[in-house]
Image (cartoon, rainbow, N blue to C red):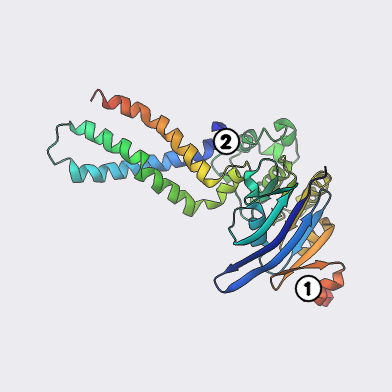
């Protein structure tokens, strides 16, 4: 049976402000869904609701025929890269990988042009880019069917952005990936399906002209 | 499972030791002058053990919550919820406190 993630009827408000209104989305292995939207439109809120760490009164989330209220609690279903760094700063790269070693081959994971140089370094002493690179790689290598990436390119040097994009593309053969980033050009480049969060709703983006029509990018950007 | 919890447990334990020392000092100031059938050292160890398992633990978890909230995602991605993390860490603290309780018998 092919795995799938189905999200429906997601609504969320903060006080009087309705941020998400009836969001519906489906994701399958092979999908790299790019979520676009201006700051404060609810991209992170949506990802946290799907992952199950943000409460909302209205939501329906189904993964592989199983309706879940907090998907992150179910083994191997979903992984999430939060917007801000999440690795404990006091432990080394080696230790982090060792803790996650049930999920992948530790040695192979560290055979990498970025990580091989910093294996004994504490997370707190890594550069922002190295730390983000490690986080993206960790989350993508977990044994989950679906991955949610919130700002995966944040702080990563231009040299390593291509590595991250290739990693996302490689993993998408077996996983469904939903990602968002403030740099929409990276999202447009790596994703194969696009949605724009606008006015609380999710608008499918078929062409670049849609982004101009919805006022997300000015005409001269393309 | 213990391996997964180590970073969180270590952070909470370090904070807890400091918070509990402060709480024990304050308790000692308040109660040691009063008459008791127990020795002062017995009372100090008993206060310390008490605070490690109560106020010290809760203050540490609260401090972590307000300063390093994002680190919970390290555990969420392994399927461990915040409540489960607290319960498991609390259990590990019980093991830490056992030697103190043992010492109490001989003081």
Q: Quadrant of residue A218?
A: bottom right
The image position of residue A47, as x and y in percent, is 67, 57
Is there a contact, CB below 8 Å, between mark 1 and mark 2? no
- Residue A143 vs A60, above or below: the answer is above
What residue appears at the point 75 percent right and 33 percent down from the top-left corner?
A108
Residue A128's x, y, as percent?
Answer: 64, 51
| Residue A217's disc number | 1
Mark 2 neighbour class, 10 Å CA radius: few under 14, some 14 to 19, many 20 or more: some
Q: Position of residue A193 (x, y in %)?
A: 83, 59
At horizontal 59% and vertical 37% (from top left) the residue drawn is A92
Q: Is residue A176 visible to the viewer in this orientation of the structure?
A: yes
Q: Image point 45% across, 42% down: which residue?
A: B12
Quarter containing the C terminus of chain A: bottom right
Q: Nearer the viewer, residue A180 or A17?
A: A17
Q: Is residue B37 above or below residue A22?
A: above
Q: Label 1 vs label 2: CA separation?
A: 44 Å
């Amino acid at each position: 049976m092919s795995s799938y993630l189905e999200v429906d009827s997601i609504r969320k408000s903060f006080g009087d402000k309705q941020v998400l209104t009836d969001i519906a989305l489906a994701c399958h292995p092979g999908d790299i869904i790019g979520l676009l939207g201006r700051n404060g439109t609810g991209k992170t809120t949506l990802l946290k609701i799907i992952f199950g760490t943000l409460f909302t009164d209205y939501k329906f989330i189904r993964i592989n025929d199983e309706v879940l209220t907090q998907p992150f609690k179910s083994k191997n279903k979903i992984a999430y890269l939060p917007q801000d760094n999440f690795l404990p700063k006091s432990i080394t790269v080696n230790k982090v990988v060792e803790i996650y070693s049930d999920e992948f081959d530790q040695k192979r994971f560290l055979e990498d042009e970025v990580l091989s140089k910093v294996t004994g370094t504490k997370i707190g002493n890594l550069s922002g880019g190295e730390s983000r690179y490690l986080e993206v790689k960790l989350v993508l290598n977990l044994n989950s069917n679906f991955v949610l990436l919130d700002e995966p390119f944040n702080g990563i040097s231009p040299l390593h952005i291509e590595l991250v994009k290739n990693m996302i593309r490689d993993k998408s053969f077996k996983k469904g990936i939903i990602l968002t980033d403030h740099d929409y050009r990276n999202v447009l480049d790596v994703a194969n399906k696009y949605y724009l969060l606008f006015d609380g709703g999710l608008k499918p983006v078929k062409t670049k002209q849609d982004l101009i029509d919805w006022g997300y990018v000015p005409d001269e950007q393309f | 499972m213990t391996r997964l919890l180590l970073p969180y447990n270590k952070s909470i334990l370090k904070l807890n030791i400091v918070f509990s020392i402060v709480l024990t000092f304050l308790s000692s100031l308040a109660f040691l002058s009063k008459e008791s059938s127990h020795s002062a050292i017995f009372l100090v160890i008993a206060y310390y053990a008490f605070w490690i398992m109560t106020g010290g633990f809760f203050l540490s978890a609260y401090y972590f919550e307000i300063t390093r909230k994002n680190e919970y995602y390290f555990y969420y991605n392994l399927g461990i919820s915040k409540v489960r993390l607290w319960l498991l860490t609390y259990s590990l603290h019980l093991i830490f406190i056992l030697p103190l309780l043992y010492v109490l018998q001989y003081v």
